[in-house]
Each structure stands twice: as C-alpha cells, then as structure tokens.
Amino acid sequence: MPKSLDLYVILSINGDDKRLEAFKLYQEAFNAKNLADDLLPDESGEIHIQMDINGHKFGIFPGDGHNSRGNTICQFEFETEDELRKTYEILSKEAQEHSTGTDFWCELFATVTDKFGIFWCLCVPN
C-alpha cells in the first residue's frame, strides 16, 4: 500500500461557461473553495477548476460527458513514481486498455481500464 494516496474526483463538463456555472453552484451548495489563484484559461486555452469541498479535492475539467467513461473520473494521486508504477502494474494485468505518459500538470500519469471495465486514472502531480 502506498504511504500516501489522495483521491481526486474529476467532473467532466463541456464549456468554460458551464464549468464556471457548476463551480458557483458547488460553492453555494458545499462551500467549495477554489484551489487556484484565479479562474482563467490555462495552457490549453480552457478553464480547469480545482476546488476543495470539505477537505476533498475535486476538479471540473473539459469534456462532454458522452464517452464510455461517463462524466466522473476518480484519480488517485501518488507521492512517488514507484508507488504509481506498482499500482499500475497490478491493475494492468488482463486490463482492457492501459497507457502511461506525462503532461504539463503531472510528472507521470497512467490510465487503466481494468479487466472488470473500471477506469482508473493514476498520477504523480507536479
């Protein structure tokens, strides 16, 4: 078991205006706090909102919600690449699909649709 493992829930909503509207709703309903300094577009040109709801991390990111994974993704954030790789190796046995990579928002990420059809997103954030 990894030493520290944070769960990050991603809500996939298409359109900057809809993401901002959703954030305002969650601020009112759950007293959600914005974890970024602003709500401006990032390197991709779109608004990605990171928020805290009662100590739990949520992201409201671009997406149409009409893919095979639905519009909610659970992402586990690891402290080290070794911890991520161990979990990835176990989940990818007999997996339907899996991949690893890097991006501007993380040192390493992996996605796995396991043998039961459950989609997992794993990352080591920057």
Image (tube, rainbow, N blue to C red):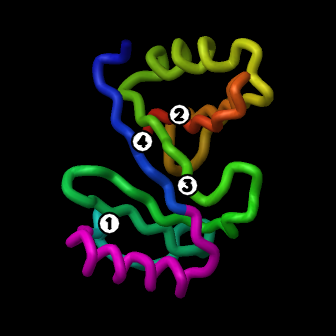
Q: Locate residue 96: give its quadrant.
A: top right
Magenta segment, which residues? 12-33
**Does residue 17 sit above or below 83 in this rendering?**
below
Mark 3, Cα crowd under 10 Å, few <14 / some 14-19 / many 20+, is some
Distance from Cα at disc 1 to Cα at disc 2: 21 Å
Which percent across, then down, holds residue 41? 51, 76
Q: Label 2, on which residue?
A: 122
Q: Label 1, on which residue?
A: 36
Q: Label 4, on which residue?
A: 126
Mark 2, Cα crowd under 10 Å, few <14 / some 14-19 / many 20+, is many
Mark 1, Cα crowd under 10 Å, few <14 / some 14-19 / many 20+, is few
Q: Which circle, 4 or 3, is nearer the viewer?
A: 3
* Residue at horizontal 67 percent and vertical 64 percent from the top: 65
* Residue at horizontal 75 percent and vertical 57 percent from the top: 67
Q: Is residue 13 magenta?
A: yes
Which percent across, then down, holds residue 84? 50, 22
* Residue at horizontal 36 percent and vertical 81 percent from the top: 25
Q: Quadrant of the N terminus?
A: top left
Q: Label 3, on which residue?
A: 72
Say what amino acid the circle numbered 3 marks.
Thr
**Residue nearest the viewer, comparing 64 with 80:** 64
Mark 4, Cα crowd under 10 Å, few <14 / some 14-19 / many 20+, is few
Say what amino acid the circle numbered 4 marks.
Asn
Q: Which circle, 2 or 4, is nearer the viewer?
A: 2
Sequence-first tag of 4 and 3: 3
Mark 2 in CB contact with mark 4 (< 8 angstroms): no
Q: Which circle, 1 or 3, is nearer the viewer?
A: 3
Task: Say which element carries label 2.
Answer: strand
Task: Say which element carries label 1.
Answer: loop
Q: Which circle, 1 or 4, is nearer the viewer?
A: 1
* Residue at horizontal 69 percent and vertical 69 percent from the top: 64
